[in-house]
Structures are given as structure tokens and as C-alpha cells.
Amino acid sequence: MPGKTVHDKQRVLMELNPDLREQRAKPGDTIVYEGDVASFFLLVVEGWVALTKSLEDGETQIVDVLMDGDFALITANGATLLPYSAEALDEVRYVAFTQEMINGPQPEAAALRSHLAANIAVTQSRTAELLLRLGHGTAEQRVCYALLELFLRLEAVGKTQEANFSIPMTQKQLGMFTGLSNVHICRTLRRFARNGLVRTRGRTKVEIIDLEAICRIAGVDLEMLRSEIILDESA
């Protein structure tokens, strides 16, 4: 679906399926629970959704974050039990649809299927990059990578101003994304602030002051990372 905005994708879905309706979730709402039986695609029209997995002791890991225009396949093998929960991090508007809804012969349906496949490939790329840092990175590397990923993805949807952006995540949730404790996140961000690398304001405002240094700590070539984890909507 070359050059299409999230609203174009939503419009095509609605045209193909006139009975389809946009849904909403408030911060903290769980859209689906890990272990539920379900199989559908999720298009985030606006807002942030965390995909999470939980251990029996209550520890939770955010395995991916969805934002404006992102698709996710909410299913398990054989459409049995869901492998993760989907939780709204802020006010979310989304559309849930099944594979059957986009399997028609219409050119728009074919374009949407192609776009979904490309989106899944990009998701796999960013998951691989995150797992690399979780498995081998220091706390500083993990936090730097997370900030760079979120910055690039927000930049792609026009929600940055130079290196300033907002993330609707608490320090605890950022820790859930990077595999670190709330205390560890707090100390790392304070150290970055003292060294003139990153400035945070309030709960959600982030400014990357020294982008080159953050890339160096994360072990990231920014342009290469952008090409790997950002879907080229014009292609």
C-alpha cells in the first residue's frame, strides 16, 4: 500500500468491510489477555499498545510496542492460545480484523496484504535488534537502543521535533521494555542527564541531546537501523 497513511489503511479496511468499527481503549486497558483464544489483526490508528508476557511470579516483559499505523498479528499457532497480552499505554484507537476480511480479489485487498507482510518483516527486524541488546547489552546499551528505536519510529510518523519526543511510558514500563528495574532505569537516565546525553521532563518528555553518543553507546548505525526497522511507506 505505497504512500498510504494510517487513515488510508483504515479507510480501505472500512470500505472492504462496511460493518467494521473503530474501537477505543483507555490507558491501562487490556485489549486481549495472554492465554485467550483469538486470531485477528490489529491496526493501531492512534496511540501506543504494549505487547506483554508475564511469568508466574508476576514479572512482566514488554516484547513490543505498537504505535500509530502499526499492524500486529494477534494469534498463536493454530489460533489456540494467545502468546501475549495487548495493553493500552495511552488513549488508543484501533481496528481489529480477521484474515478473511482482506482475502478478497480487490486490488485494495491485495495491496493491504502486501503491506501487512512488509510490516511483519519490519517487526521481526526490530524484535531481533531488541533481543540482541537484552541478551548481550549493558543497561546503558539497552536504554540507548530503546530511546533510538522509539525516536526513529516516532520520527517516521511525524511526532518528533528535532530530537524531542514524548513516550507514554513510565520508568517502570521502560524497564519492562529493556529488561531492567525501575531503579536501574532511573539511575541510568540520571547519569545520561549529568553527562549531557539525554534530558527528560515530567513523565513522558525526552530530548536526545547528543545523538552521536547515544548511537555509539547503543552500538547503532542510525541510518542502517532506520532502514531496518522503519517501513518505507513510499516504496
Image: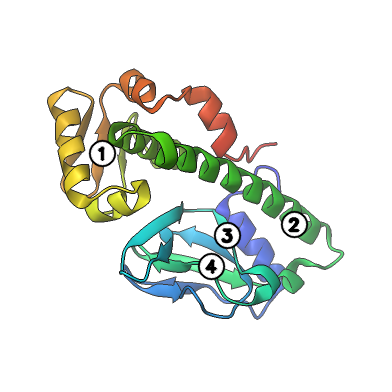
Q: Residue at x 58, y 34 (%)?
A: 228
Q: Earlier in the sequence, mark 2 or mark 3?
A: 3
Kindly state the secondary structure of the residue where label 2 is placed. helix
Q: Does label 3 or label 4 sit earlier along the sequence?
A: 3
Of 101 and 143, nearer the camera is 143
Q: Residue furthest right?
A: 105
Circle 1 sits on which residue?
A: 206
Give the mark toward the camera: 2 or 3: 3
Q: Amino acid at mark 3?
A: Ala
What residue appears at the point 64 percent right and 51 percent down from the top-left corner?
A: 120
Which residue is denoted by mark 2 in the rendering? 113
Q: Position of residue 65 (x, y in %)?
A: 44, 53
| Classed neighbour count for the residue bearing mark 2: other residues with Cα under 10 Å, few (<14), some (14–19), many (≥20) | some
Across the whole image, how many numbered discs are drawn on residues?
A: 4
* Disc 3 from disc 4: Cα separation: 13 Å
Left or right placement of residue 158 versus residue 22 in this view: left
- The residue under label 3 is 72
For disc 3, the neighbor class at 10 Å (few under 14, some 14 to 19, many from 20) is many
Identity, as a three-letter code, of the amino acid under mark 2: Arg
Residue located at (77% from left, 61% from top): 109
